[in-house]
Image (cartoon, coloured by chain):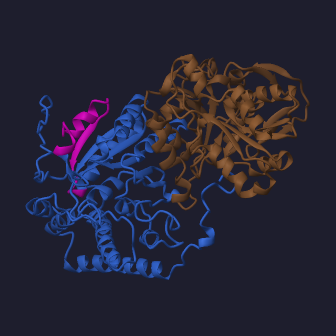
Chain colours: A blue, B brown
Amino acid sequence: MSTTTRRSTGATGTQRSVAPRKTPAPPTGGRGPGHEHELELLRQMLLIRRFEERCVELYSAAKIRGFVHLYIGEEAVAVGVGQALRGDDAVVSTYREHGHALARGVSAGAVMAEMFGKATGCSRGRGGSMHLFDAGRRFYGGNAIVAGGLPLAAGLALADRMRGTERVTCCFFGDGAYAEGEFHETANLAALWQLPLLLVCENNLYAMGTSLAREHAQTNLAMRAASYGMPAWTVDGMDVLAVEATARKAADSVRSGGGPHFLEARTYRFRAHSMYDPDRYREKDEIARWKARDPLAGLEERMRAEGGLDDLANKRLEEDVSAEIDAAVRAAEAAPYEPVADLLRFVTSPSGGAS
Amino acid sequence: MNARRSASGGSTASTTYREALRDGLREALRTDDRVFLMGEDVGRYGGCFGVSLGLLEEFGPDRIRDTPLSESAFVGAGIGAALGGLRPVVEIMTVNFSLLALDQILNNAATLLHMSGGQLSVPIVIRMTTGAGRQLAAQHSHSLEGWYAHIPGIRVLTPATMDDARHMLAAALDDPDPVVMFEHGSLYNEEGVLDGTVDSVDLDSAAVRRLGTDVSVITYGGSLPKALAAAETLAADGIGAEVVDLRSLRPLDDATVLASVARTHRAVIVDEAWRSGSISAEVAARIAERSFYELDAPVQRVCSQEVPIPYARQLEEAALPQPASIVAAVRQAVA
């Protein structure tokens, strides 16, 4: 990589507002003769996509309130990285985390109910869109302070290492978080202590409305991460198979004692930053170029070419996903609100006593 | 009092506040292998105020863990480790430096239980030095524990006696929720006697440290010795000052404070923090809300002057509550 000049484009040119070239995905053999695995990846990405499209409708209908940050366009990252993680690994996420939660196996019903503010929500209506939690799946939020989840993730990894487990903690964050001190403090700490931490930077080229080149003096994020003394790789975040392959390699290395690894996934959000954002800062051409690299369409196209998907199978997939989301919305509508009498619950633990 | 007697009975032992804290840490590390200490210079250096001296040799670098100078990362890592099943004790050098970790303390430690709908508790203990009196000027001397006491979801402790220094940590580690402990810098070298019959303390109650009938002097932390000195002076003049040590700023033990005021009908609050928006204001408000008709005189407050704490000795002394200013406030209250 070119690393010497300030604002270097490097070999990968991340600050240019064009889509990176498509990189060929590695072969996916070894997972059965059919395309069951690819079909599952497609199903997970489709669930996230359709779930969030429904969120937009429900937001417009005022069923969902607060800040809602959509992941549409970035689905390949959550789903691809998710394949590399085990059930007892930990995931720490951001406020744009519907996709991470769904990919982690949190049910669409629990996430939707949370967004409705219902008692059956995965945070019992205390968190909303930005604060999804599922302790059973070791899904630790849902952090809406940019970069605030990074130190937590280091601590989870530290606990695992001190307890002698082989678990990995995966922390998702964005290019905006990369500018925060907490990223750099955590990268140093994790490398210094060789913590089993997988740092996944979802570089969608914008920190809210500020483009990568306007927020980072050096836009080669992987190179800077490597300077902390950890392996740091970049992957095409629009290609779920490429993300999976690279994340597996990284997670396996972390798990086997290789210390923290940094993975930059080049991706793009197709929608605005949040439901409030008029999206004045991005060129329509740029958005169109990235949409042409839609991770769902890319995988679908590839599967069709390989004979792993046809219209019938695709229709069935759409119907299954649609039914799952319908059921989630129905259940959320019907669920009770947490009683106001319980307002002060969960401020301290029942056996604690401070208030 | 707020102490349980040990079954074995026991004798009194001379110690210092620093040694009492260290003995509390040592006991916690010995009895629970989930407990570990981390912070800047807690290991090889022995702690910036010497509290953890010798613990590295006894427990090793995994459990007495020196950190880089990155308060946000190592406090946040402590929170994550607590989520991960350990019982971290995190030391921050001073309360002024803790502001670099305030995001983690407020936005994560204090909120995760609630935001997660009760799924995640954060059993972390964060210790730090607070307060002035050592000519360390305006970036090492402030008393911001009242700010922390504003935050629901954390417990705020201010050990001021040998027994509290020795035993509060164990009780704090038993709490499933985050605890922030403030050790006043002027107390580390204080010498005193441990009550050998005490082997644990409760965290929910204030303590009456001296009985008196004429006025309640309500204080905590580094101001406790000053309040007791003032009470001694006042006693010579026939004024009986009851001294209440809050011990915990959150939760506040209203009952002990109000019961004292109901006995003496006068209240003087001594707080080394700035007066505006301080814990002294909270205590005064609670007395006004709940014990207004018990009062025979307006509540008095003795707080620090509203100035960044200066370096020069005479200026620093003038900025802080002192026995003489406490005596003066009491005289006004009982006049």
Q: Nearer the viewer, residue A99 or A41?
A: A99
Based on the displayed image, in which of its 4 quarters is residue A209 positioned? bottom left
Based on the displayed image, in which of its 4 quarters is residue A320 positioned? bottom left
Q: Which residues are magenta?
A: A213-240
Q: Position of residue B284 (x, y in %)?
A: 68, 48
Q: Is residue B323 left or right of residue B74?
A: right
Q: Position of residue A342 (x, y in %)?
A: 62, 68
Q: Is residue A63 above or below residue B71?
A: below
Please tell me whether residue A232 belongs to the stretch shown in magenta. Answer: yes
Residue B213 in view, yes or no? yes
Q: Nearer the viewer, residue B99 or B118?
A: B99
Q: Nearer the viewer, residue A322 or B82?
A: B82
Q: Is residue B187 above or below residue A38?
A: above
User: Residue at the front extreme?
Assistant: B335
Residue displayed at 34% across by 35% down: A184
Q: Position of residue A217 (x, y in %)?
A: 19, 37
Please tell me whether residue A180 belongs to the stretch shown in magenta. Answer: no
Q: Nearer the viewer, residue A109 or A26?
A: A109
Q: Position of residue B316 (x, y in %)?
A: 56, 23
Q: Is residue A148 left or right of residue A214?
A: right
Residue displayed at 62% across by 48% down: B177
Image quarter where the N terminus of chain B lies is top right
Residue B224 in view, yes or no? no
Image quarter where the C terminus of chain B lies is top right
Residue displayed at 69% across by 48% down: B252
Q: Is residue B122 above or below residue A296?
A: above
